[in-house]
Image (spheres, rainbow, N blue to C red):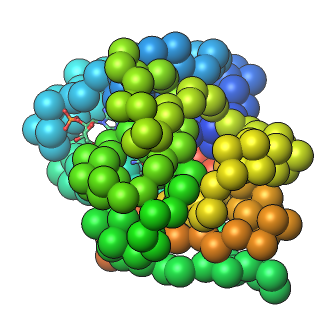
Amino acid sequence: MYKVLILGGTSEGVALANKLSADPIIIPITSLAGRTREPKDVQGFLRQGGFGGVEGLVHYLKSEEVFAVFDATHPFAIQITKNAFSACKSAKIPLARLTREPWAAETGDDWHNVENIAEAVESIPVGARAFVTTGRQELEPYFERRDIWTLVRVIDMPAKQLELGRGKFIAGRGPFSVEDEVDLMRGYGVDLLVSKNSGGQSSYGKIIAARQLGLPVVMVRPPELTLETVICYSLNEASEWLKGCLN
Ligand code: NAP
């Protein structure tokens, strides 16, 4: 039996664990950072919480006798991706990254590409009503803009709502249909969408909805990583890579 560690936090990570659990010689172990109150059900084993940096991850890989690692974390989760690279190199364990191609603007899209959240916040026009979907980290810069109203979508509703007049938190976890996204954006009368360019299908509905409504999108570019890691863009590529490691 071969233990395969899947660093998760994405729908692709769940799909990979479910696929590998059907293989009688593989034991998938999904690892989550532990930020979401009720993570999605996943087949195989589940562990939660940080490892304690590169050193902690190396220790985990060795003590659990992990055969191979998939980094299926979100394209913007760069610290864990760097840690996985260094730890696997040090422990001499094969590593592949299961990730997504970033979205590309299409006809009808009005994207304003920015490098980070600070730039995204700066580029929101004065007095605008912004639909913010960049996650619950780094929300402060939005709230420092006293002139804008924000509709902030997060997975887990925070204990406190925003001050009246500043905006509103809504909780939700994708995938969201285009129709629902159109209704939501229309219902709250938003003027623009702020999104990370995360790629993948599960959160693409809002991008199509913005296109249909003729709304601009402030799009945060994915971080560039120059790590020499095998990249898989589909579950099939991921299982082919693993098969290659087993042979
Ligand atoms: P990050 O900045 O890259 O990682 C920070 C620390 O969190 C890591 O050093 C590690 O702690 C721990 N960690 C992260 N992912 C982990 C995992 N899968 N298993 C165990 N520990 C993990 O990560 P982040 O941007 O905060 O994202 C946290 C999680 O949310 C990730 O799993 C990611 O896939 C998911 N996510 C992130 C975003 C995003 O926009 N960043 C969006 C959707 C989902 P130690 O150093 O102690 O090991």
Q: Is residue 185 left or right of residue 149?
A: right
Give 121 or 3, whichever is nearer the viewer.
Answer: 121
Which residue is depicted at the point 82% across and 44% down?
183
Report whether residue 72 is seen: no
**What residue is at 59 percent from the left and 47 percent from the top?**
242
Q: Nearer the viewer, residue 233 or 193?
A: 193
The quarter of the picture where residue 210 lies is: bottom right
Where residue 231 appears, as percent x and y from the top left, is 53, 64
Vertical comparison of 24 with 12: above or below? above
Residue at horizontal 25%, vertical 53%? 144
Q: Nearer the viewer, residue 247 or 179?
A: 179
Quadrant location, ligand no. 1: top left
The image quadrant of residue 211 is bottom right
For residue 242, say whether it is visible. yes
| Residue 135 horizontal/vertical position (percent) | 44, 44
State which quarter of the image contains the N terminus.
Answer: top right
Q: Name the residue at 63% across, 38% down.
A: 11
User: Does 130 sit above or below residue 220?
Assistant: above
Furthest residue in direction left, as rendered: 55
222 with respect to 247 (left or right):
left
Relative image position of residue 228 (x, y in whole percent): 36, 71
Q: Nearer the viewer, residue 14 or 244?
A: 14
Residue 192 vertical position relative to residue 13 in the rendered view, above or below: below
Horizontal and vertical percent position of residue 33: 35, 29
